[in-house]
Amino acid sequence: MLQTVDFSDGQFTARAMTDDEQAAHAASVREDLLADKNAEIDRSRAAANASVFPFQDKLIACDALSRSDIDGVANHIALFGAFPVGFPGGWKATDKTMLPLPDVDAFRALYAAMTEQGTRNFNRSQELKVHLAAASTPEEIAAIQW
């Protein structure tokens, strides 16, 4: 039985919680655990989006700097219909090999691979949140992992 402390007439007194108080306490703890796990899922998705994505059997970095470069090239193509001046004709994979991107369509395929990974990450987070909504015990909540 859970206990609580009452304060009355300058005195603290321990007493057993009523069934209603225990139920309210359990609901409050569950809500806190759900909120924490939901935030954890969101952080995991953000980390996954900022890590790597597969393209042509290689991994491409998608950290803030890499994403800025990818988006910069994409925006230039959107504005001008061509690669920026000095574009090296390829993209470096995480293993330091250069993947050829000889034309805008090849770059579009790279960009599509990045957005596909983002979609997979989003779908994974939504799947976990469905499991989270169904979880009823602290153990079930804790078992949900990215």
Image (spheres, helix red, strand yellow):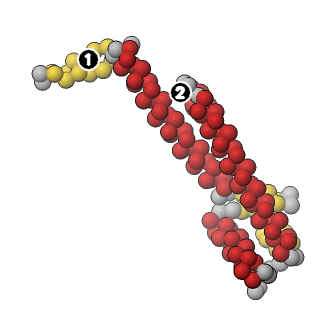
Whichever of labels 1 and 2 marks the residue nearer the N terminus, that label is: 1
Task: Report whether 75 appears left or right of 44.
Answer: right
Could you say which disc has been placed on residue 14 in the image?
Answer: 1
Residue type at mark 1: give it. Ala
Quarter of the figure that contains the N terminus: top left
Which x, y percent locates residue 48?
Answer: 66, 52
Q: Position of residue 72 (x, y in %)?
A: 68, 75
Element under disc 2:
helix
Location of residue 140 by image quarter: top right
The residue tagged 2 is: 138
Residue at image position (72%, 52%) is 119
Q: In percent of the image, x 80 and y 65: which residue is there? A: 110
- Which quadrant does the C terminus fall into? top right
The three-letter code of the residue at mark 2 reads Pro
Residue closest to the eye, 45 or 19: 19
Q: Which of 36 and 65 lies nearest the eye of the viewer?
A: 36
Between 92 and 26, the one lying in front of the other is: 26
Q: Going 73% across and 59% down the picture, which residue do you hit?
A: 115
Q: CB of mark 1 within 8 Å of CB of mark 2?
A: no
Q: Residue at x 19, y 23 (%)?
A: 7
Left or right of 27 on screen, residue 137: right
Q: Which mark is residue 26?
A: none
Residue 95 rendering spot, x and y as whole percentages: 79, 62
Left or right: 21 as drawn, with respect to 136: left
Q: Residues within 10 Å of mark 2 (few under 14, many from 20)?
A: few
For residue 38, what is the image quadrant? top right
